[in-house]
Image (tube, helix red, strand yellow):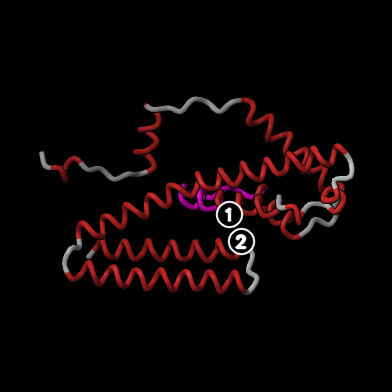
Amino acid sequence: MSLKACLVPITRAFLSSYYDKHQFPPISDDVARLSEQLYSFSADLQDATIPLPQGERYLLEEVESQPPHKIDENMWKNREQIEEIIFLLENSHWPKLLQQQSTPEDVELARLLKQLREKCARLLKIVILPVQEFRTRVQHSYDLYAQDFRGALIRKQRQRSEKNKKAQVDALINSGGSIRDRYALLWQHQMERRRQLAQLGSA
């Protein structure tokens, strides 16, 4: 039997049957309990600060919206939200009274917020790692299958394209674009890369 005959399309039904045989352990009950606590804290904070600042209002909308259906888009959204959280946990975004840390409670809360920010920064690195590894694998595939003049042309074109993309992102940041704006542009770039990769595969 040829290798091609063994290949099957990776459909939702195929993945479902695969994971029926290889099930994950069930999610801990603590996840639901802690989620409820977080929603409760969030509701209390909303009652205390009306109207909510734009950044916090955006985060609330994101939390209450349906998660993206595709895994890669979901991971992308996770990155965006972690960056938003890190941004909002910076000292400059704390309430003025908390910034002054005039009571022992404020000092303790400030310490916890700093710890949370550090944990989110570490989490962001973990979430970004698979993307970086995937890019390395794609580059390796380029180098492996296009070792003649075509490979050199593709590499030059890709370098130019990446330089232009970086310039667009830098221009957006310098003009005061938000994290949300930046991720919308980065997602657009990602879809462009995907189209180019599909075209290269077809060629």
Within-10-Å neighbours for mark 1: few <14, some 14–19, many 20+: some
Residue at 70 percent across and 44 percent down: it is: 114
Say above or below: 107 vs 157: above
- Nearer to us in this view, 7 or 108: 108
Q: Amino acid at mark 1?
A: Glu
Q: Please provide the residue range marked out in magenta.
A: 64-77
Label 2 vs 1, first from the N-terminus: 1
Badge 1 marks a residue whose secondary structure is helix
- What distance separates the C-alpha of mark 2 from that of mark 1? 7 Å
Label total for image:
2
The quadrant of the rendering that contains the C terminus is bottom left
Q: Quadrant of residue 11?
A: top left
In the image: residue 140, left or right of residue 96: left
Q: Position of residue 40 (x, y in %)?
A: 77, 38
Q: Quadrant of the N terminus?
A: top left
Q: Position of residue 176 (x, y in %)?
A: 65, 70
- Left or right, 166 with respect to 4, comes to right
Q: Is residue 11 left or right of residue 70?
A: left
Disc 2 secondary structure class: helix
Residue 67 is covered by the magenta coloring = yes
Task: Look at the picture and state if 177 lies above or below 103.
Answer: below
**Residue at 69% in and 56% down:** 58
Q: Is disc 2 in contact with disc 1, using a CB cutoff of under 8 Å?
A: yes
Q: Which residue is mark 1?
A: 80
Q: Which residue is mark 2?
A: 180
Q: Is residue 70 magenta?
A: yes
Q: Residues within 10 Å of mark 2 (few under 14, many from 20)?
A: some
| x, y percent for residue 57 | 74, 55
The kind of residue tagged 2 is Arg
**Residue for point 66% across, 45% down:** 117
